[in-house]
Image (cartoon, helix red, strand yellow):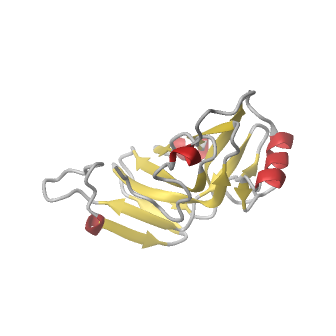
Amino acid sequence: MIRNDAWITEMVREHGMIEPFEQEQVRKGNISYGLSSYGYDVRLAPEFKFVEPGPEGIVDAKAQNTNLVKEVTGNVLDLPPKSFVLGRTVEYLRIPRKVIALGTGKSTYARCGILVNLTPFEPEWEGFVTIGISNTSAHPVRLYANEGIAQILFFESDDAPDVSYNDRGGKYQAQQDITTSKI
């Protein structure tokens, strides 16, 4: 069952599910973030990583060379056309054992050609969320740090899973910064 704003607020109090937590949607002059009717709009942190192709001109998820990662910080990032960057959320998430969460990009950015990719947040996963951001347009698109980038929807099951992400020792558990692919 998808969960509403009252349930999300309760899980924040009980499990520290979202930190920092905005009880209401913040909009005034911003791309909105905070609690919504059936989810939570997370913000983009002011740090980014560009993953450059290796010597063969390939970005290899199984053999990523950290020497080819360019780090950038700032409150604004003009993402070049047809390019990709990794970002992270301002918020740290702790997913309860009977919950799975899915994220999707904000429509404000989608209307500019930005695709936001977030993988599912499994039961008992926690960390800052690494976000893949692609500019599909033929023009640079400006990204704003500390403003909304994606909406997270929370789904609660009647039963807890036999094995959670934490039980499995998931490789992205408790990530503290933008994390590139791991094997």
Furthest-bottom residue in this view: 73
In screen coordinates, is 64 left or right of 35? left
Residue pictured at 53% horizontal, 42% vertical: 110
Q: Nearer the viewer, residue 162 or 48?
A: 162
Where residue 36 sits, quadrant-wise, is: top right
Which quadrant would the N terminus be assigned to in this image?
A: top right
Residue pictured at 69% horizontal, 33% vertical: 160
In screen coordinates, is 99 left or right of 138? right
- One can see residue 96 in this view: yes
Q: Nearer the viewer, residue 176 or 104?
A: 176
Q: Nearer the viewer, residue 110 or 123?
A: 123
What x and y, as percent, mark residue 124? 63, 46
Q: Is residue 63 above or below residue 151?
A: below
Residue pictured at 51% horizontal, 72% vertical: 74
Give the tally of numbered discs: 0
In screen coordinates, is 87 left or right of 20? left
What x and y, as percent, mark residue 45? 57, 64
- One can see residue 24 in this view: no
Residue pictured at 58% horizontal, 43% vertical: 121
Q: Is residue 157 above or below residue 43?
A: above
